[in-house]
Amino acid sequence: MREQDYNPLAHEDFDSPHREFARLRQECPVAHSDAFNGFWMLTRHADIRAVLEDWQEYTTTVRNVVPGSSATRRRPPLHLDPPAQTPYRRAIDRALGPKRVAGIAPVIEGHARRLMQAFVAKGGGDLVELYSSPLPAFAFANWFALDDTQTDLLWHTAKDFVKAWEAFDVTAVERTSQVIYDLAAALIAARRVAPLDAERDPVSSLLAARDEDGGPLDDEMLLGCVRQILVVGLVAPPVFLGSVAVHFARDPALQAQLRADLSLIPAATEEMLRLYTPYRGFARTSRSGVVLHGREIAPGEPIALAYTSANRDAAVFEDPDEFRLGRRNINEHLAFGRGPHRCAGMAMARVILQAGVREMLANTREIALAGEVRMSGMPEVGPVYVPLAVS
């Protein structure tokens, strides 16, 4: 029996994951856990970046997240390596070009402003439930051209899906995942009959895409891809914006500084992304087996990549636990990954997150905690319940 180096099931508060990752970076950079049928975890920036960039050795086709689920059918582009991944990635990129992202930005900002003004009118509450969860849902609804009923279904099902993951409730994961698959199937059927502009609509772009042989994308893979992009952008933003709110509540001076100059929001958001990267469970497996820091990892064993740990690695970031506006090497953070699976939606994600941070500050005079936060379980890291008092 291997000794367990890391226990993702241990109780966590807002700061404890980062203390644990600091310990692992120092003492056990390749850690093993018995949880979820066993997995390895990498915690150092250099090791994680090397894995992300070496897709020939470290594949995403076997295991791409810890914990896994029996509900995971093949979902490109995450579940494929190049060149099979490429047609899906190109189609998504086409529907997220600079003009499309610029065009959707005012809509996202409007949603953020409306949600935060309603939050302030209530005097606060759970920021995740009332602000950071609906915001990305409304953004994705606009991108996918969903109607009001579909938007409501996506938001509430995505919330239930995330909660099922937090509870490691496999039955609930499968049930909620199927609802999103059904929504994806309905969108595909509608766009086959009446396609939209492929430069703006992701489903229409995927239907227009061609595989390596010049044919249309496989129906089952197409369904998996639409389902993947429907849900993936709704998981991280609520947790991340919850972390930002906790940070602001602890640092009134930073609140005041950013309110006085909202042009600092993009740089502040990027540093917050480094400090509070909401991922620790994206995974790869080795094709041939590797030895890292003296630990032997067999082919096919899950290797979790703790992005949130990498982004606080003192070997890369000076005083890594401090918030530093305008950090000189901020572009070294791995919040959006690296290599061929770098986040396809990172341009839109930045718009959503910057709007979320900006409106959180622009519509308040004070942000304060009003109770204990509740933390997410793996594969994310960060708060899923953030009680705030605002004025």
Image (cartoon, grey):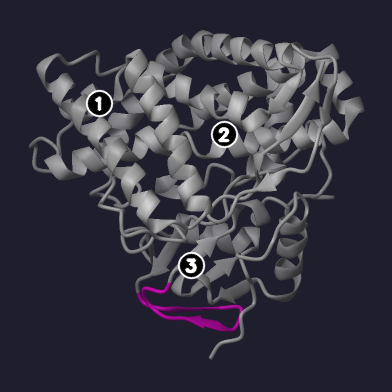
For the residues bearing labels 1 and 2, Cβ distance under 8 angstroms: no
- Residue located at (69% from left, 61% from top): 11
**Which residue is identified by label 2?**
237
Q: Residues within 10 Å of mark 2 (few under 14, many from 20)?
A: many
Query: Mark 2 falls on what kind of element?
Result: helix
The amino acid beneath tag 2 is Pro
**Which residue is identified by label 1?**
203
* Position of residue 154 in the picture relative to residue 8 (left or right): left
Query: Mark 3 falls on what kind of element?
Result: strand
Quadrant in which residue 257 is drawn: top right
- Residue located at (57% from left, 27% from top): 350
Point out the tag, 1 or 2, that comes first from the N-terminus. Answer: 1
Distance of mark 3 from mark 2, alpha carbons?
24 Å
**Which residue is identified by label 3?**
303
The amino acid beneath tag 3 is Ile
Q: Which residues are magenta?
A: 288-301
